[in-house]
């Protein structure tokens, strides 16, 4: 498996992200879906990675610049065929290391509060993310939780 920075131009990643958005829309009301579409992910403030397994996309994730010291984890998705394989942990480690290398001191995220999002919340908890108030442009929402992690601790703990 390879983790590569993606320019978001292939039809395969477009389909993978379309499926991600459809899943998010099926699980949450429209006002609670904060997943970004392909055009939004092409913002210069976002770096996007895909994980490939042979010729297929196995996972993706992104890092969004918020301030010089704060970034947001976006668009984490693992293909159903790769659930519970450790791939999400590997990708999250990669993104945390990249955020640390860019001198961010805090990494935050928004995810769902309902049962289908429990595996994601457990993954983030395992990596030391803790629950926090909404950040950036997020507002309180019963369908969302917000999590954050100081990054200065991660330099030695999460090297690949």
Image (tube, rainbow, N blue to C red):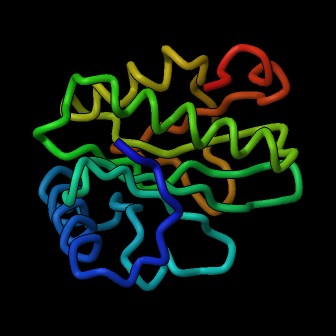
With respect to residue 20, does 151 lie above or below? Answer: above
Q: Position of residue 30 (x, y in %)?
A: 26, 67
* Residue lying farthest to the front in this orientation: 54
**Is 104 positioned to the left or the right of 38 in the image?**
right
**Is 154 positioned to the left or the right of 27 in the image?**
right
Residue depicted at x 59% and y 24%:
129
With respect to residue 117, does 43 lie above or below? Answer: below
Residue depicted at x 16% and y 64%:
19
Q: Nearer the viewer, residue 34 or 10?
A: 10
**Is 37 positioned to the left or the right of 126 in the image?**
left
Which of the 4 image quarters holds residue 10?
bottom left
Q: Quadrant of the C terminus?
A: top right
Which of the 4 image quarters holds residue 36?
bottom left
Q: Quadrant of the N terminus?
A: top left
With respect to residue 116, does 39 lie above or below? Answer: below
Residue depicted at x 72% and y 45%:
99
Q: Position of residue 17 (x, y in %)?
A: 27, 67
Q: Position of residue 49 (x, y in %)?
A: 48, 58
- Number of numbered tags placed on the structure image: 0
Q: Nearer the viewer, residue 58 or 36?
A: 58
Which of the 4 image quarters holds residue 85?
top left
Q: Nearer the viewer, residue 60 or 52?
A: 52
**Is 12 positioned to the left or the right of 156 in the image?**
left
Residue depicted at x 41% and y 61%:
34
């Amino acid at each position: 498996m390879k983790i590569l920075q993606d320019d978001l131009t292939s039809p395969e990643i477009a389909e993978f992200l379309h499926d991600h958005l459809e899943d998010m829309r099926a699980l949450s009301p429209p006002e609670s879906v904060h997943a970004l579409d392909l055009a939004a992910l092409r913002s210069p403030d976002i770096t996007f990675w895909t994980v490939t397994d042979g010729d297929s996309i196995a996972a993706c994730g992104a890092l969004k610049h918020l301030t010089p010291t704060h970034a947001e984890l976006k668009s984490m998705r693992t293909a159903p065929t790769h659930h519970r394989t450790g791939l999400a942990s590997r990708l999250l480690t990669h993104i945390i290391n990249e955020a640390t290398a860019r001198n961010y001191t805090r990494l935050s995220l928004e995810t769902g509060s309902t049962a289908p999002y429990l595996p994601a919340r457990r993954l983030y908890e395992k990596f030391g993310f803790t629950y926090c108030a909404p950040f950036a442009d997020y507002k309180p929402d019963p369908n969302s939780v917000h999590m954050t992690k100081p990054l200065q601790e991660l330099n030695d703990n999460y090297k690949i």
